Image (cartoon, coloured by chain):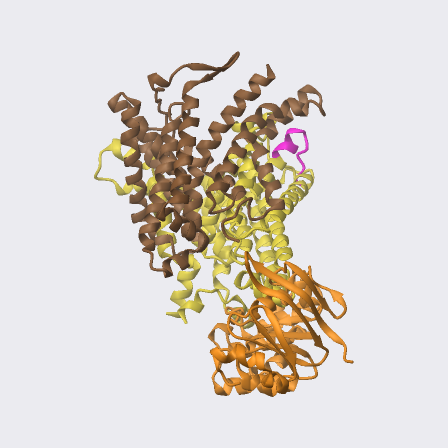
């Protein structure tokens, strides 16, 4: 029985009468790549917000690496190794790609309450940052202001920043959204390389990617998990097929 | 007797609170619906007072002066909106703060230019002059009661408009999610003008009403503007109900607090120190109150947006 | 490309060599001024004016630290000027003239006020923050006016300038000018160091994208509060200098209009450029000083009465000028210089 790294128990979030997250329980094992799929409006992003700490939950528990992090703020969760990427790219456009990643390295490298010294020239931050950029294929674009990168490159930068926080678990919110064929291939490759080294929870609509990469898949419909299992089993599940009937993608 | 004093100050507090509400209501709507921080709102209040002073001197009748002042104040507010404010809706808050600050500097000086720096005198209208005995041994000025009545009436009308009319519904919707309202096809430009004009008129009305009892002078809108901000912050931006309750609270804390702070302090300190400290703390009470509320509720008591 | 140029890419600039001409020229001008002043024949007036410019330069710089680099629109910054000034005034009125006591007290008081009000204000967002800082500033203003023992509304006159280590070093205007310049240089160097440091980078990142900063493990609040305290202390120092410059302390130092003027100085100079804040302060004060004269001269065809009336009401021109600058001069003076450099 593998270790459970992320244990979500009876999580709830309602807006008035609408239950966006409706009694969700999920256990993610260390080292697995666990995909969460579901039709639009199922509450996937809300769930990620709750797990990452961007949104508070009405009730339920989130246990990470044995610790109850339900009340922790986002930054505290990141410090404990729970990092995320955003569906809508969220980077620092005025800073270079290198500095974007270097800041993530800085967050875990000692105190940032240093008032002296030139942060932009710290080798101890820039060298690891460059490595992460190279890992996602952005090494050549390191000095460019992040705002000038192409959309696909920005998605890669998101990934690099998340990786630079040295996470135990990575929450990826639609990393392939809006990417063209080449870029998405690149992201899938990167994720394939990360498989097993980092635990990954992946929200995606791209079913090819999901079924190629995922060890297990959970299906979220109207805020509830209707099925969890290996990709093969999920494909064959009648309820899942019914939920997707109005939204035939590539299942 | 202390009870009489307490009652008088409570009434004063309510009166002050209602005036604050009239000013804060327009401000909170403009902020809630248009995301526009208007420092020059206090100037509307001042303009209302000056207009009623000018018309009162011209016609010799307060009532007529009031009837003339209100539409003029409205027109003036709309003029400012068209000329300046409209161009600031898309700008960030910093730019809005600076530009409206410039408007205050200009108008405070303009008013001095036209009417001079000395305070203007507006006589209390005959029918509302004098005091009335509202409880045994308790005399209270009729005019202040009139202000309270007028304030409550306007609050009632405002409540009716906002809760029970289509425009009111659009305004409430706009206060919670303006882009959505626009996306639904509502002429947002016109809605903004309605909200803005109405707010300006409310402030002008407040200024006109207090003209007989306060000094009408350049800069009279500045301090009350800051108090209106405190009201909004405590009540919650975009919320009329919040503004109403917060305004009354502040009015009471300020007037009752100022009078009784020295006495309360006498419990802990000797009379001389108590009175000195009391007088130093009294003007700070509202702000301490604000700090306390915000400490527990950073979004105010009744925020319109979640 | 233009959009990015306006987002102040400080990080990109600092990785390469860039000729820092503007601050060099600026400080050289300040250093040369006393010589020119003595040549002008109005030495006292020029020194006094330029000292005021430098003092406001420090205050504006302190605001730029949180406004330009942190996007915190503090509309109550004049309160710190007041704290600094009143620290000097109150201690002096009790016989403590020594600057080496007054300044630390001022710094401590500023830090305390910043810590308490910042802790409350920074938990709120956007417009709330502006309104709350405005309110706190007003609160302190009223406190100052109600301190009857220290002059109340009318303020407090200082018998003389503060003693520095027991000496009357800053009694002379020239000596005081050099001390002020030293303070200006010192705070400028400190601010530059802070901006380039790890701390400064977190602050700048939080300005661009606070959610992103949280997502990599930073809690913006702590950094913003620290920056707010540092900024307050710097402005407190400026307040001490101001009290000594005027040999007078009054609530007028800390009105909300003064806070607005500080914001205006920073924006005029260019947000996120420390020497820009100093330039903005200089321009503002010079305009304030000479606009009445300019108006008087420009209205030469009108009659004497009107000209006097116009000059008296120079603020009527000042107000619209502010509005126009906000609307048209994006990026302030430094922005104009940068555009000229690229174009």
Q: x, y (%) of residue C148? A: 59, 25
Residue C336 occupies quadrant: bottom left
Q: Residue furthest top?
A: B137
Q: x, y (%) of residue A115? A: 65, 60
Q: x, y (%) of residue C329? A: 37, 57
Q: Which chain is orange?
A: A
Residue C97 lies in the magenta stretch: yes
Give the side of residue B36 with respect to residue C97, left or right.
left
Q: Is residue B166 above or below residue C19?
A: above
Q: Is residue C318 above or below residue A1?
A: above
Residue C319 occupies quadrant: top left
Q: Where is the N terminus of chain C found, in terms of image quarters?
A: bottom left
Residue drawn at (47%, 29%) of the image: B16
Residue drawn at (27%, 26%) of the image: B64
Q: Is residue A217 above or below residue B281?
A: below
Q: Which chain is yellow?
A: C
Q: x, y (%) of residue B173? A: 42, 52
Residue A38 occupies quadrant: bottom right
Range drawn in magenta: C89-99
Relative depth, front residue between B193 and C49? B193
Task: Say if residue C214 shows up in the picture.
Answer: yes
């Amino acid at each position: 029985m593998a270790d459970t790294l992320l244990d979500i128990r009876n999580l709830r979030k309602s807006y008035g009468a609408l239950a966006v997250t409706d009694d969700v329980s999920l256990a993610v094992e260390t080292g697995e790549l666990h995909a969460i799929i579901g039709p639009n409006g199922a509450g996937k992003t809300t769930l990620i917000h709750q797990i990452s700490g961007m949104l508070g939950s009405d009730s339920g528990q989130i246990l990470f690496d044995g610790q109850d992090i339900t009340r922790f703020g986002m930054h505290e969760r990141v410090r404990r190794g729970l990092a995320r990427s955003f569906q809508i790219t969220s980077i620092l456009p005025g800073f270079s790609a290198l500095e974007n990643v270097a800041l993530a390295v800085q967050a875990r490298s000692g105190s940032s309450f240093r008032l002296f010294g030139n942060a932009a020239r710290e080798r101890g931050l820039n060298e690891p940052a460059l490595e992460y950029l190279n890992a996602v294929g952005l090494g050549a674009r390191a000095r460019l202001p992040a705002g000038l990168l192409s959309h696909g490159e920005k998605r890669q930068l998101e990934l690099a920043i998340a990786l630079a926080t040295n996470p135990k678990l990575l929450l990826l919110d639609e990393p392939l959204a809006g990417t063209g064929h080449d870029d998405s291939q690149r992201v899938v490759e990167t994720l394939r390389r990360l498989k097993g080294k980092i635990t990954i929870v992946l929200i995606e609509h791209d079913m090819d990617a999901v079924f190629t990469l995922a060890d297990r898949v959970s299906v979220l419909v109207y805020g509830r998990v209707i099925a969890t299992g290996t990709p093969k089993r999920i494909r064959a599940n009648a309820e899942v097929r019914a939920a997707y009937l109005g939204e035939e993608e590539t299942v | 007797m202390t009870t009489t004093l307490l009652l008088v100050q409570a009434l004063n507090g309510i009166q002050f609170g209602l005036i604050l509400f009239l000013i804060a209501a327009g401000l909170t709507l403009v902020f809630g619906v248009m995301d526009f921080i208007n420092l020059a709102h206090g100037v509307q209040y001042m303009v209302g007072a000056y207009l009623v002073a000018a018309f009162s001197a011209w016609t010799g009748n307060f009532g007529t002066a009031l009837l003339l002042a209100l539409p003029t104040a409205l027109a003036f507010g709309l003029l400012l909106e068209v000329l300046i404010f409209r161009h600031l809706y898309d700008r960030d808050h910093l730019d809005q703060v600076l530009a409206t600050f410039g408007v205050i500097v200009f108008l405070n000086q303009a008013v001095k230019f036209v009417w001079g720096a000395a305070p203007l005198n507006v006589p209390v209208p005959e029918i509302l002059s004098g005091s009335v005995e509202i409880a045994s041994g308790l005399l209270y000025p009729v005019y202040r009661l009139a202000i309270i009545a007028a304030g409550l009436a306007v609050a009632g009308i405002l409540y009716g408009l906002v809760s029970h009319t289509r425009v009111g519904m659009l305004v409430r919707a706009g206060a919670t999610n303006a882009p959505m309202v626009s996306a639904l096809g509502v002429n947002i430009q016109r809605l903004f003008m309605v909200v803005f004009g109405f707010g300006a008129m409310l402030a002008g009305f407040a200024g006109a009403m207090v003209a007989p009892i306060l000094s009408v002078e350049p800069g009279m809108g500045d301090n009350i503007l800051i108090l209106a901000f405190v009201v909004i912050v405590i009540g919650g931006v975009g919320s009329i109900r919040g503004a109403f309750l917060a305004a009354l609270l502040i009015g009471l804390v300020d007037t009752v607090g100022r009078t009784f702070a020295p006495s309360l302090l006498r419990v802990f300190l000797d009379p001389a120190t108590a009175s000195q400290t009391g007088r130093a703390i009294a003007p700070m009470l509202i702000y301490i109150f604000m700090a306390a509320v915000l400490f527990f509720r950073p979004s105010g008591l009744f925020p319109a947006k979640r | 490309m233009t959009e990015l140029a306006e987002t102040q890419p400080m990080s990109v600039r600092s990785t390469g060599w860039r000729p820092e001409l503007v601050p060099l020229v600026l400080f050289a001008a300040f250093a040369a001024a006393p010589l020119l002043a003595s040549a002008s024949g109005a030495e006292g007036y020029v020194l006094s004016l330029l000292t005021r410019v430098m003092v406001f330069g420090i205050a504006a710089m302190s605001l730029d630290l949180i406004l330009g680099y942190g996007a915190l629109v503090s509309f109550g910054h004049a309160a710190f000027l007041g704290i600094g000034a009143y620290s000097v005034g109150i201690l002096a009125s009790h016989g403590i003239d020594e600057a080496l006591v007054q300044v630390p007290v001022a710094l401590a008081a500023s830090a305390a006020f910043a810590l308490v009000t910042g802790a409350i204000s920074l938990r709120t967002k956007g417009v709330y923050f502006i309104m709350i800082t405005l309110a706190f500033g007003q609160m302190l203003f009223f406190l100052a006016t109600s301190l009857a023992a220290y002059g109340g509304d009318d303020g407090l006159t200082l018998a003389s300038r503060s003693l520095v280590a027991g000496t009357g070093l800053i009694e002379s205007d020239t000596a005081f000018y050099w001390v002020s310049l030293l303070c200006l240089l010192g705070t400028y160097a400190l601010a530059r160091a802070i901006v380039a440091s790890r701390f400064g980078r977190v602050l700048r990142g939080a300005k661009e994208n606070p959610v992103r900063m949280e997502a990599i493990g930073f809690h913006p609040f702590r950094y913003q509060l620290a920056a707010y305290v540092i900024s307050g202390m710097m402005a407190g120092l400026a307040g001490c200098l101001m009290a000594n410059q005027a040999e007078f302390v009054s609530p007028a130092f800390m009105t909300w209009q003064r806070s607005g003027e500080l914001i205006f100085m920073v924006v005029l100079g260019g947000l996120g450029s420390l020497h820009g804040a100093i330039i903005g302060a200089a321009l503002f004060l010079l305009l304030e000083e000479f606009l009445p004269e300019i108006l008087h001269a420009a209205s030469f065809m009108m009659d004497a009465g009107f000209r006097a009336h116009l000059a008296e009401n120079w603020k009527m021109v000042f107000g619209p000028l502010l509005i126009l600058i906000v609307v048209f001069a994006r990026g302030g003076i430094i922005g104009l210089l940068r555009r000229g450099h690229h174009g």
